[in-house]
Amino acid sequence: VRTAEVRGDSLVAQARREAEQVQAQARDAVDRLRAEAQTRADAVVAEARGNPLAEAGARALADRILSEANRQADALIADADARANALVQAAEEERDALIAEARAGAGG
């Protein structure tokens, strides 16, 4: 039983490391996405400088660009969190099955 517990705990630890990598990759992608959106928004506003009417429209467009980037970023994070949680949950279930099997084989 102890061997199954150790093996199961190792599986869970590995899944947690993989989950952290998934989340870190998502954070990196979100950082890039937001930076690119900010660059595009700044360029739109800069292009309209000097024309008050164009500036108002450019600011509205820049806000939409940033809002869409934030929506996409939130979706990326949510997806990464779901994948990370699924990895850990699957490993925990496998660990529990290994332990239950070992206990059944050991007679209780």
Image (cartoon, grey):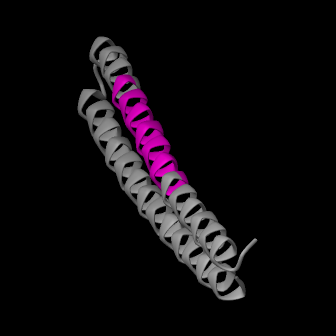
Compared to 71, does 107 lie above or below? below
Which portion, as a residue range, is magenta? Answer: 64-85
| Quarter residue 4 falls in | bottom right
Q: Is residue 73 highlighted in magenta?
A: yes
Q: Say left or right for 87 vs 51.
A: right
Decide whether the magenta segment is chiefly helix, strand or loop. helix
Residue at 38%, 36% in the rendered image: 72
Query: Among all residues in the image, which is located at the extreme front?
Result: 107
Q: Position of residue 46 (x, y in %)?
A: 30, 36
Nearer to us in this view, 58 or 65: 65
Coordinates of residue 59 in the picture (x, y in percent): 38, 23
The quarter of the image holding the C terminus is bottom right
Of 91 and 49, which appears nearest the observer? 91
Seen in the image, is 17 located left or right of residue 56?
right
- Please tell me in which quadrant of the rendered image residue 20 appears: bottom right
Question: Going by the picture, which residue comes out furthest to the top?
Answer: 53
Quadrant location of the N terminus in the rendered image: bottom right
